[in-house]
Image: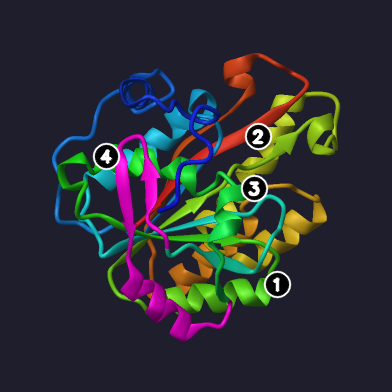
């Protein structure tokens, strides 16, 4: 059993406070403004969702998880996040995950199937103790699936240091597995001294939005080549760019055509701090 490592930091560790915070994320003016409605029998192939503190990115995340709540439950939610310190290649934890809402079980059969399709997957649960990008998705996933909380299963993957070609290999392997939904955990442009990224000092918010909007368009167009070229050219620091490459290859191999940007804002919109910013966006692929 993997115990929660980031409760009390990115989200409350108390059950009641956690539930209330997620509820507020849904009802906030930056959130969808309502709770999920009825579940339908439509599958969702993937969402992109942020992974910052719920205070900052929870409202954005709520848009994507509302779509999850209103869709068919797959055999597994494959949660793919970046390891911010680039540890390992593609690390899977086979231990079940505990959160204040209870235990989320790992789908061991899909882990085994994925490992048979690519040698990139490493059993490395310890790496999961050092990064929050997967863990912060779990309470949201449990909250929107509370009617089926004992049925849902996950496959938690942290991407460390792999090449672009290896991202494509992982995306292709995932496309060969039936009835899974990818949850891609990423924030977008990080601006400011603490992120070592200040390509401009005037019209900061507009310039950030211009960079993000170009990245979003390449994602929606599933244009892997131009996305990679642009990110490298402007030295953008979207932390989950490798998981996004995996997603876009998965989409191409799975013939997924429909995608939408659900929500976008940055931390300046909440904090008012003009010296640093992190961008948050949520997408759906169906």
Quadrant in which residue 276 is drawn:
top right
* Mark 4 neighbour density, 10 Å: few (under 14) some (14–19) many (20 or more): many
Q: Disc 2 designates what residue?
A: 209
Q: Are marks 4 and 1 in contact (CB under 8 Å)?
A: no
Which span is picked out in magenta? 95-120
Horizontal side of residue 189 vs 46, given as left or right = right
* Cα–Cα span, label 3 and label 4: 31 Å
Q: Which mark is residue 214?
A: 3
Asked if residue 244 shows in the view, the reply is no
Of mark 3 and mark 1, the one earlier in the sequence is: 1
Residue 39 placement, left or right of 157:
left
The mark lying in front, picked from 3 and 1, is 1
Q: Which residue is mark 1?
A: 163
Residue receiving disc 4? 144
Callouts 3 and 4 close, C-beta under 8 Å: no
Q: CA distance from mark 1 to mark 2?
A: 27 Å
- Depth order, front residue of 256/17: 17
Under tag 4, what secondary structure? Answer: helix
Q: Residue furthest bottom?
A: 116
Q: Quadrant of residue 152?
A: bottom left
**In this rendering, the label closer to the viewer, 3 or 4:** 4
For the point 43% across and 44% down, the residue is 137
């Amino acid at each position: 059993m993997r115990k929660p490592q980031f409760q009390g930091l990115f989200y409350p560790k108390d059950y009641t406070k956690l539930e209330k915070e997620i509820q507020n994320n849904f009802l906030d003016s930056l959130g969808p403004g309502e709770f999920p409605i009825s579940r339908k029998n439509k599958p969702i192939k993937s969402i992109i969702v942020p992974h910052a503190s719920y205070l900052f990115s929870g409202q954005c995340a709520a848009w994507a998880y509302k779509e999850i709540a209103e869709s068919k439950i797959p055999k597994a939610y494959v949660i793919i996040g970046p390891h911010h310190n680039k540890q390992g290649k593609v690390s899977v934890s086979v231990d079940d995950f505990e959160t204040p809402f209870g235990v989320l079980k790992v789908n061991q059969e899909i882990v085994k199937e994925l490992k048979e399709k690519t040698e990139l997957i490493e059993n490395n649960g310890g790496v999961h103790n050092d990064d929050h990008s997967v863990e912060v998705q779990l309470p949201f996933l449990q909250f929107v699936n509370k009617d089926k909380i004992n049925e849902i299963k996950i496959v938690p993957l942290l991407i460390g240091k792999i090449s672009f070609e290896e991202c494509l290999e992982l995306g292709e392997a995932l496309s060969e597995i039936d009835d899974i939904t990818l949850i891609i955990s990423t924030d977008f442009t990080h601006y400011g001294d603490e992120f070592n990224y200040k390509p401009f000092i005037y019209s900061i918010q507009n310039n950030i939005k211009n960079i993000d909007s170009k990245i979003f368009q390449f994602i929606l167009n599933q244009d892997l080549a131009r996305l990679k070229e642009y990110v490298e050219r402007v030295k953008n620091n979207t932390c989950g760019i490798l998981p996004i490459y995996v997603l876009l290859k998965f989409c191409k191999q799975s013939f997924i055509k429909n995608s939408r940007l659900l929500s976008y804002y940055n931390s300046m919109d909440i904090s008012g701090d003009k010296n640093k910013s992190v961008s948050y966006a949520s997408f759906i692929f169906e």
